[in-house]
Image (cartoon, helix red, strand yellow):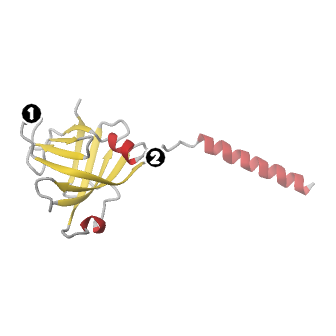
Amino acid sequence: MKTSRSCAALTALVISALVLAACAPKQRVLSDEEAYKRFVGTWVNTEYPGTPERTKVTVIRPDYVGEDWPFPTSTVLDGQWTIKIKKTWVDEKGNTYCQFFGRYVEDPTHRFAALMRVDQKGEVWEDCSKAVGVGDNAEDRAVYPEKIDSSLSSYWIYYRKK
């Protein structure tokens, strides 16, 4: 009699766990390539004055290159940087994150460890980064941001150009 009660209780517990698991929100796992595609596009912030430190337009290209443009109407590129993905993930709110190692094309000694985030709707792009020192294994020694930190001096927020 005790065995059948224990078995019934265990069965009820397993069924309850399965029901709860089915109700829990599913977090979709994306490949780095799928996650990166969410960042591709033209991002604009007209609140910035349009300086090299705060360009008004950033373009994330499909070929893992970022571009900085001073203004939405600019015809001359301000700078380019490469994007080498370290890690991507999607949080419980549906925001997509990408940690990456960046290097400016014009000045390859200007390197940085960065984190960018695009919101679930794909409308807001944020980025924060930290400078990386020189040396052969600088990428391996880089300390990557784990969360978006708007208090960093290298923090940007842009909105998808429509």
Q: Quadrant of residue 45?
A: top left
Tell me, for residue 92, which label it has, or none.
Answer: 2
Q: What amino acid is at disc 1?
A: Thr
Image mark count: 2
Quarter in which the N terminus is drawn: bottom right
Q: What amino acid is at disc 2?
A: Glu
Q: Quadrant of residue 134?
A: bottom left
Query: Does 130 sit left or right of 49 as displayed?
Result: right
Tell me, for residue 45, which label it has, or none.
Answer: none
* Pointers 2 and 1 in contact (C-beta within 8 Å): no
Specify which label sits upstream in the sequence, 2 or 1. 1
Check the image and report above or below for 49 versus 101.
above
In this view, the residue in front, 126 or 106, is: 106
Which secondary structure lies at badge 1?
Answer: loop
State the residue position of label 1.
73
In the rendered image, residue 124, in percent from the top left (x then y), is placed at 29, 40
In the rendered image, residue 138, in percent from the top left (x then y), is placed at 24, 67
What residue do we see at 38% from left, 39% from top? 120
In the rendered image, residue 110, in percent from the top left (x then y), is placed at 15, 60
